[in-house]
Image: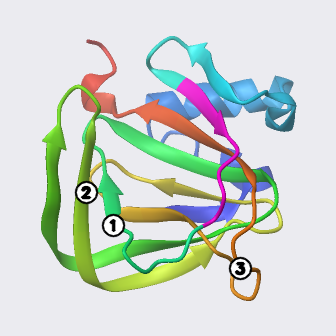
Amino acid sequence: MIYGALEDLARYAGFCKSLDILIDWLADNDPAELACGCHEICGAKVFANVMAPTTRSNSGSHYETHRRYHDLQVDVEGREAFRVALGETAQVEPFSEADDFELVDAARFIEGDLAEGRFALFVAGEPHLPTLQFPGDGPVQIKKICFKLIADEYFDE
């Protein structure tokens, strides 16, 4: 995971080709202006899923993983917490190649939040549990963006 202020994202240029594309796009575009839905930035290599979910309790929630894409998540309205699994995981739902998605559980984790302009880049294969209630807030609707960034090993497909 890479975690920091969105204004500092350019520090991570060179991490992967798709992140470099996103950094360039963000220099000329305000992501907060995107409406809910899917927005292509560079075809299927870099795109933005904009959504307005309600934050949830971590009780009964499962971590998600992806193999082809990194997720760079940022809140543009409201705030959420997240977890990243540490150590061993147990599969809850098998990996779907078509959806690039698997659900797992984990006993150990670290936590963070997307308040105050922060972002989290969850790398491919990293179990993460986003859209959790920010401590003390309870369930609230937020507007968030999940930028999908193709991993370098799939970039030229």
Q: Residue at 80% of width from left, 60% of height from top?
A: 117
Question: Which quadrant of the structure image shows residue 145?
Answer: top right
Q: Earlier in the sequence, mark 3 or mark 1?
A: 1
Q: Is residue 55 left or right of residue 102?
A: right
Quadrant of residue 84 within the rendered picture: bottom left
Identify the residue under disc 1: 62
Q: Quadrant of the C terminus?
A: top left
Q: Earlier in the sequence, mark 2 or mark 1?
A: 1
**Magenta residues, start to end:** 47-55
Marks 3 and 1, Cα distance to the nearest angstrom? 19 Å
- Residue at the image point whose x is 77% and y is 68% from the top: 115
- Tell me the kind of residue under disc 1: His
Could you tell me which residue is drawn at 66 percent across and 40 percent down? 51
Front residue of this view, candidates 30 and 54: 54
Residue matched to label 2: 103
Say what amino acid the circle numbered 2 marks.
Answer: Leu
Image: 123 above or below 68: below
Residue 81, image x, y percentages: 62, 73
Q: Is residue 27 above or below residue 70?
A: above
Q: Report the residue marked by disc 3.
A: 138
Disc nearest the viewer among 3 and 1? 3
- Quadrant location of residue 155? top left
Q: Residues within 10 Å of mark 1 (few under 14, many from 20)?
A: some
Describe the element under mark 3 as helix, strand or loop.
Answer: loop
